[in-house]
Amino acid sequence: SIKTSSHNMSGENSTDLLKGYLTIVPSGLECVASNFIRNTLEESSYACHELKILRPTGGDEETIDQLKEKLRLQNKKRDARKKRKNKRLAPTTKNDNEKTSNLSNNSDDAQMVGTLKRADGTEVSMGYHNGMAVTSNPGPLEGTLLLQFHTNAPARVVASIRGMGCGPLLAIATTSLDTTDENNNDINSDSKNQTAELSSSSQILSDDQTLEEAIQSLSGFLLQHHERNKNNYTSRFRRALSLWFEHAHDVWYGTEFYKLDCDDTKNDCIQRSMTVESKFKGKIPFKYRISCLRSHTKRYGWKREDIIAPLADQLVPVKELSGVDLSDGGNNSNTTENTDTDKDDTTPQWQVDLRNYDFEVLTILHTNSVTVAIPLRPYQYLSAKTYSQGRLPPDVTPPYIIPVRSCTIRLRPSTAALLLHLAKLQPGDVVFDPCAGMGTIPIETSMRRGGCIGLGGDVVLTAEVGDFIDTATEYLSAAVNHAKRQQSKTTTKNGVISELMASDAAMLPIRDGSVDCIVSDLPFGQKCLSSSKLSQLLPLFMFECARVLRPDVGRVVFLCGSYQGVLDALTSIECKSFDDPLKKANVFIFPCTSVFPVNIGGLTAWIIVVKRGNGTPMPIKDHRTKARKIAGIRKRVEESEKNLRARNKSGAAGEGPIKVKTGKAKAQRIDHADLET
C-alpha cells in the first residue's frame, strides 16, 4: 500500500502525485542507498513507493550460491598454501592462530570474502553486510546499478537527498529492466533486498548484433514494450519532462540551492525561470540534446553515436509534443492522442542544440538493457562535465566549487553520506576523519540531521601545500553559506559544525576516548604512498584510532583499496593484560560487522565496519620513530613531484633536468598549540 503523505492536501488519489525517479548507485552500495533514500523521505513524512533495484544481468551469470562455492574452494586452497609457507618459515604461535580465526571466520556462508572470476572471465568481488552476501563488479558503468523509486515529495526535497548513489538524479521515461509491474518488488528496510532482474527474454542488445540489428531492436522496444500496460512511450516521456520542469523551475532557478554560473545570479535566474515556463507552455520551442552511456564498450562492434542518431525522433517525440501546453503535469493520457489536431504547420518545432540546451535526454545501454531518462542536475550551468563524454559526470551535490573540479580529486559527497549512514550516527556524536583531504566526510557529517560534529585532519592541510589548503578553506566556507541559505528556507536549524586541522594520522593530537566514530577514506597505496609504505603506516594508524575511540561505543567505517591489509593492521593491535585473568577484553570486536566490496570510480574498493571493544590498546614499540620515518618518506615524495612539475614547465625553454634531493627530512611534531582550526 502507498503511504499517504501529510503534505498531500488535495482530494486526488495519492497515486496521481507519485513521480518516478532514477539514480545510479555503485554496486555494493545499492542496499545502503535504498535504505538511505527511503528513510530520508519517510522522516520528512513523504511516501516512497516501488523502490526497486534494477540489476542488469548478462543472461549466463552464476548465482550467489555458485559464487560462494567457488570462493570457498579458492579460500581453502589459499589458506593451505599460507599454512605450508608459515610452517616452513616459523612455527605458528597461539596468538597467530587467534588472529587467523578473527580474519577467516567463514563458518557462515554469508561471511565469505574475496575476489574470483566468473565463467565468462569477468571479475567479481564478494563480501558480507548484515549477514547477507554482497557482490560488486569493476568498471565505470559495469560496476553500477540503477535504483528506481516513486515519491510524492516536492522537487526541492528530492534534490536535497545527499546519499543519492553516485550523485546522478534522473526522471525516468522508460526502461527494459522494470519487468515486474504486476509483482511489486518493494524493498523494506527490515527485509531482504528484492531486485528486478533482467531475464534472458528481456534482453534488448547482445554482443553479436550488428548496428542495423541493434537499431531495429531498440526501435521495436520503444514502440511495443509498454503497449501491454496501455502506457505508451510518449506519455511517459511527457511525465518525465514535467518532472524536469519542476526541478528546473523550483530548484535550479527558483532558489539558491545551486550557485549557477552567471554574472548576476538573481536576475539571470529569474529570467531563465520565466523562459523555461514559456517553453513548457508551448509558446517557445525547447532546445535539447541526446547523450548516451554504454557499458562494455569494447564488446560491441558499433559506436554509441552511431546508434543514437537514427533513433533521435523516437527517443524525443518532437512531433507529438512541440507547441503543446505541458503544464498539466502529463497526467492526462488522452492529450497525446489529440495533439495533432491542436497544431498547424507553423508550430515551432523543438531544436537540437549541443551547447545551449534546456534539457538532456540520456540513453543508458547497460549490459544488454536500455533505459531512457532526463537528468535533473544542472551540469550545463555549473561548468561541469556532462553525460556527453560517455562517462558519469561529477557529483554536484552542494556545495560545489570550481577548484574542486579543476585540480582536486575527492570522494563523492553522495558516497561519503552513505559511509556515514553505515556508521549509524546518534545525535551529538563526534565523527573524526584522520585522512580528511579537503574535508568531504567532516562536512557531510555536519550536514546530517541531529547535530553531529565533524572533525578532519590531514598532513596536506599545511602551509607548504598552499593550493590544497585554499581549496579546503573555500569548500568549508561554501558549506557554511549553503547551510545558511537552507536554514532561511526551512524550519530545521542545522548549522555546519565542522573543523579541519593539520595533523598526522600516525600521531593524532586528540585525547584518549574522545571520539564516537571514525569514518575515513584511506589511501589506496597508489597516489600518496606505495603499498609497502602503506603497510608500515597502517598499524600505527590503527593504534591511534583505537586510542581516540570511546571503548564499547566507538565504531569504525573504512573505505580502502585492499581489505586484507586493513584487517591485518586491526588484528595486530594487542590489548593490555589485566591482573584479573577472568576479565577478557578486546580492542576491536571480531569478526567485523561488515566487509564488502564497492565500486569507486570503476575500481573495486572495500568497506570495513568494525566496533570498538573495551580493551586498552598496547602501545607500539618505537611508535614515534616509525611515524617520523614515514613522514620523511612522504615529504621526499612531495618534493619529487613538485620538482617534476617544475621540470615539465621548464621543458619548453630547453633547460636540463632538475636534480631531486633524496636526503632525510626531519618531521616536526604537531602540538596542540600549533594547530589552527
Image (cartoon, grey):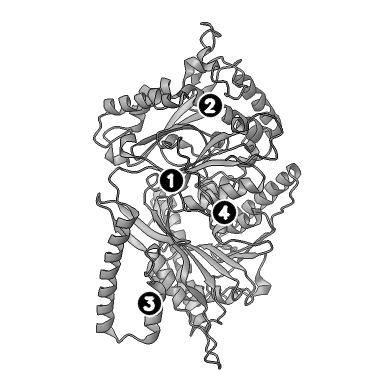
Q: Which residue is mark 3?
A: 100
Q: Is residue 91 above or below residue 261?
A: below
| Whether residue 663 can be seen here | no
> Label 1: how many residues lie within 10 Å, few (<14), some (14-19) or many (20+)?
some
Q: In the image shown, does 457 or 402 lie closer to the viewer?
A: 457
Tag of residue 195: 1
Q: Nearer the viewer, mark 2 or mark 1?
A: 1
The kind of residue tagged 1 is Thr
Residue where numbered disc 4 is placed: 417
Q: Are marks 3 and 1 in contact (CB under 8 Å)?
A: no
Q: CA distance from mark 3 to mark 1?
A: 35 Å
Q: Which numbered disc, 3 or 1, marks the residue that appears first in the sequence?
A: 3
Q: In the image, which is nearer the foreground, mark 3 or mark 4?
A: 3
Mark 3 vs mark 4, CA separation in Å: 32 Å
Mark 2 sits on what residue?
356
x, y percentage for residue 290? 45, 28
Instruction: Name the quadrant containing residue 563.
Output: bottom left
User: Which residue is the extreme one toward the bottom?
Assistant: 579
